[in-house]
Image (cartoon, rainbow, N blue to C red):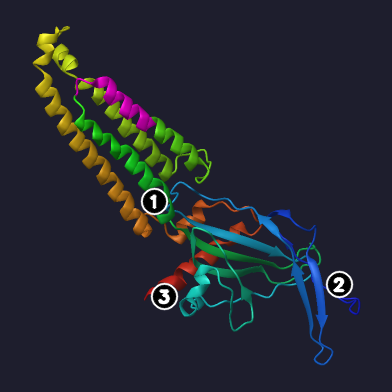
Amino acid sequence: KRNSEYDGFIPEFTMVNCVDTQFDSFQVTVRTNQRTGEIWSSHYNTCTISESLELEKFPFDRQLFRVVFKSPNSALKQWEIDVGILDFLPDFKNGKRVENTSQYLVSCELKSWTMADFKVGQFKEDVDPASLTGGEMEITIMAERSPLYFFINFVLVMYLIVATNFANVSVSPSDSADRLATTITLLLTLVAFKFVLADAIPKVGYLTYMDKYVLTSYFFLMISIVENVAVTPRFLCYLDKNGFCNELETAEFEGDATDTDFYFQIIFLVAWTFENIIVAIFSFKPQILQESWKKVQEGQIGETESSVKRTSVVEDLDLKKEQLLQ
């Protein structure tokens, strides 16, 4: 909405990487201060931003979320927001609104993410009347995914499902039907849980860390299915005699089958628990797997016109974080 009392110059803005908007153009409100002569214009819009993400390390990934503003008729003054504001105002990391000394209002709300830093960079300072291109400015938000959410709600549940297979140690190896029924039921439960998990993981054409973990859980249960067949007294007798055995000969291998199954179940549970302990360590200390911000920038292909000029922004952010850590 334009102020009817003001009919002068109003800067125009567009979002370069906006794919869907609530309004065709920014909603503008102009306010004037008759005493000082200052003119303020507020530009409002709701947009869906397009961003290419590299998700191979999901859920231990770092991402750069960018919003690019472009003005065809005015220069954009660079925003300088001190990175130290994150130390003095920790609530900012939780999505609280904070205002710095330059009177810029910044708000960030990212579910299951932690915002590590942000930077506002300017890539075109002056308007070029000949090419009809104006100022361009980019807000870069450095975000780290919180893997604890996925560990507690998904990894821990899958660990318990697969570890329940250890209960087969209480069933005689000769009762292969009951043992197979238990393991196959657990496998079907895991497959059903995978459909629940599908809504929470990204759909990409390559394997993420979470996909590899799910496949590993399938692999453990498939090994258990093979073991349920391999440790039956009948099968052990067949291997020893190189042929089929009668019931009396099969009964002689009952003890060997029980011992073999017991040792297998112990190794099975230890190996599966060890893998999940490693996952738990990575979940509580995700920086072990996380890449540097420079590598994140190199692997993340931008869709905006300023993509070739982002390297300096990310390097500047890495340098400032190193200085703070020192």
Task: Reply above or below: 293 against 232.
Answer: below
The secondary structure that dominates the magenta segment is helix
Residue 259 locus on image (x, y percent): 12, 28
**Amino acid type, residue under disc 1 in the picture:** Phe
Vertical position of residue 213 compared to residue 261: above or below:
below
Identify the image quadrant of the N terminus. bottom right
295 relative to 132 in the view: left or right: left
Mark 1, Cα crowd under 10 Å, few <14 / some 14-19 / many 20+, is many
Residue 101's place in the image compared with 113, above or below, is: below
> Dot 2: within a 10 Å radius of its alpha carbon, few (fewer than 14), some, or many (20 or more) residues?
some
Q: Which residue is mark 3?
A: 323
**How much space separates mark 1 and mark 2, taking CA atoms?**
51 Å
Task: Give the residues in magenta.
Answer: 173-187
Disc number lying in front (1 or 2): 1
* Left or right relative to 213: residue 47: right
Question: Which numbered disc, 3 or 1, marks the residue closer to the eye?
Answer: 1
User: Dot 2 corresponds to which residue?
Assistant: 2
Residue 118 location, x and y as percent? 54, 68
Residue 151's label in the rendered image is 1
Secondary element at tag 3: helix
What separation in Å lies between label 3 and label 2 (alpha carbons)? Answer: 45 Å
